[in-house]
Image (cartoon, rainbow, N blue to C red):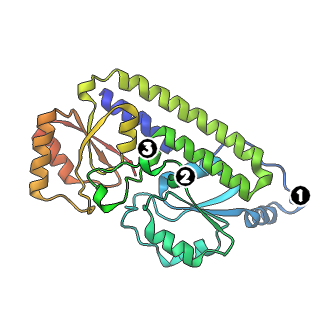
Amino acid sequence: MKSLIYLLLTLALAACSTSNNTAVAPSPAATIAPTQAANQQEQKKLLVVTTVAPLTNIVSNIAGDRVDVKGIIPEGTDSHTFEPRPSDTDILSKANLILMNGLNLESPTEKLANATKPKDTKIFEMGDNTITQDQWMFDFSFPKEKGDPNPHLWVNPKYAEAYAKLAAQQLTALDPAGKDYYATNLKNYLQRLEALDKVTREVVASIPPENRKLLTYHDSWAYWAREYGFQVIGAIQPSDFKEPSAQDVAKLIDQVKKVKVPTIFGSEVYPSKVEEQIAREANVKTANTADD
């Protein structure tokens, strides 16, 4: 139960509303008919394009209602295999700023963005500006020999904090008049992250060290595990992002039994009957999450 509680607390931030209590200054067009004024205000909004859903969530919390934030990769879509749609070309061609995770996570989208974005529109990669190469992590789905590090930094609240600060910097550079607005949203967001980190550490401290092992469906918890002293012993989804073979499943079941993993953390994004099979045959609990 404790394992499930701390994971839910960690993921709670992703479900935070993107709304905030910061008021935007009244528009000079206040004397215009409400509908017309609303349309004009909408047209004047800057467009910031993001990629994966967690990144879109973080940026939206900082941007609030002042900027139009559009995510290219829909929630529930595998970002590693996602191919941009024709409609994404139109969105990217109108973007005033493009914020990506980087670390080779969105290569097809990045290629399209470079080909279609306005000349002066900046592409900024959050992950590459958060950690250095010596801090990269490689694992089961992201082996070092292939050269691509695990890109899921945002699961670690400390890195989510860095992403939020970078988002505020980039939004302020794009829209200097909104500096105070973004700073207020950033402050509120960082307070929630700090509270999340504190509670997570308290719950982790209550879990026996020998139980701090994770078998996840998708390999997205490496940086979280390093931050909180957990060992990720494996991932159900292979490095090619397909379902594991019968031999792979048998090995995972033996490994779960050997190291006495108490819970398998699956994914609502990548539901799998294999996860249920491993849990059933290894006699352990499951906890599905939206982790990517």
- For marks 1 and 2, give the one nearer the viewer: 2
- Judging by the rendered image, the residue that carries numbered circle 1 is 28
Residue 164 to residue 2: above or below = below
| Left or right of residue 26, residue 19 in this image | left
Residue at 48%, 59% (x, y): give it.
102
- For marks 3 and 2, give the one nearer the viewer: 2
Q: Quadrant of residue 225?
A: top left
The location of residue 117, given as percent across then percent down, is 61, 74
Q: Amino acid at mark 3?
A: Val
Secondary element at image label 3 = helix
Q: Quadrant of residue 33?
A: bottom right
Counting residues from the start of the chain, the first of labels 3 and 2 encountered is 2
Q: Amino acid at mark 1?
A: Pro
Residue 92 to residue 180: above or below = below
Q: Residues within 10 Å of mark 3 (few under 14, many from 20)?
A: many
Residue at 11%, 35% (x, y): give it.
258
- Judging by the rendered image, the residue that carries numbered circle 2 is 129
Residue at 79%, 66% (x, y): give it.
40
Secondary element at image label 1 = helix
Q: CA distance from mark 1 to mark 2?
A: 38 Å
- Judging by the rendered image, the residue that carries numbered circle 3 is 155
Q: CA distance from mark 3 to mark 2?
A: 16 Å
- Give the number of marks: 3
